[in-house]
Amino acid sequence: MPQSYIEETYSGFDGGMDAFLIVKDDGKVEIVPLGGLFKTINSKDNLSLNEFKSNLDYINWEKSVKGNYLNVCRVSNVLKVEIRLNRENNSKVKAVYP
């Protein structure tokens, strides 16, 4: 088990997981949750949850990266959607799939 991780659990209602991973130049990773129940289990400096203070802040950030993910990767429990969105938005984050 890693020293630092964030857990996402199935809510039992509409279930699913959707988020952005933002990989910083210094190796730190921010998770922007969009769907699912995310919570920090053991917080270290290299991994954090980033929940925008307002929907408008999120919308403006999402517009700023659309088509140009570079250091951003979308993750989803629907693998085909995840792969398509990362491809369409030119994600430079390398994802390895089984």
Image (cartoon, helix red, strand yellow):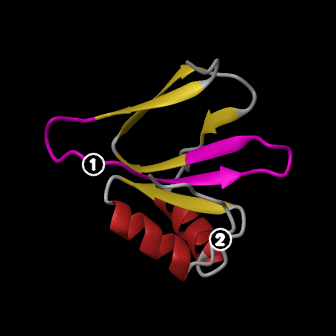
Q: According to the image, label 1 marks what residue? A: 16
SS label for mark 2: loop
**Residue 69 bears which disc, if any?**
2
Query: Residue 91, image x and y in percent?
Result: 63, 70
Q: In the visual, does 37 lie left or right of 10?
A: right
Residue type at the position of mark 2: Tyr
SS label for mark 1: loop
Indicate the quadrant where residue 65 lies: bottom right
Indicate the quadrant where residue 80 lies: bottom left
Q: From what the image shows, is residue 88 above or below residue 77?
A: below
Q: Looking at the image, which residue is at 55% across and 18% down?
A: 1
Query: Residue 21, image x and y in percent?
Result: 59, 52
Q: Residue furthest right?
A: 26
Please report the bounds of the magenta region as a residue range.
Answer: 10-31
Q: Looking at the image, which residue is at 70% across and 23% down?
A: 44
**Residue 75 bears which disc, if any?**
none
Q: Nearer the viewer, residue 77 or 56?
A: 77
Q: In the visual, does 97 lie left or right of 24?
A: left
Q: From what the image shows, is residue 75 above or below residue 29?
A: below
Q: In the visual, does 11 lie left or right of 47?
A: left
In the rendered image, residue 29 lying in the magenta stretch gets the answer: yes
Q: Residue furthest left?
A: 13
Q: Mark 1 or mark 2, which has the lower sequence index?
A: 1
Q: Are marks 1 and 2 in contact (CB under 8 Å)?
A: no
Residue type at the position of mark 1: Gly
Q: In the visual, does 9 lie left or right of 1?
A: left
Label 2: few (<14), some (14–19) or many (≥20) C-alpha neighbours in 10 Å: many
Q: From what the image shows, is residue 5 above or below residue 57?
A: above
Query: Residue 87, image x and y in percent?
Result: 53, 77
Q: Residue furthest front?
A: 98
Query: Residue 60, image x and y in percent?
Result: 59, 70
In the rendered image, residue 18 lying in the magenta stretch gets the answer: yes
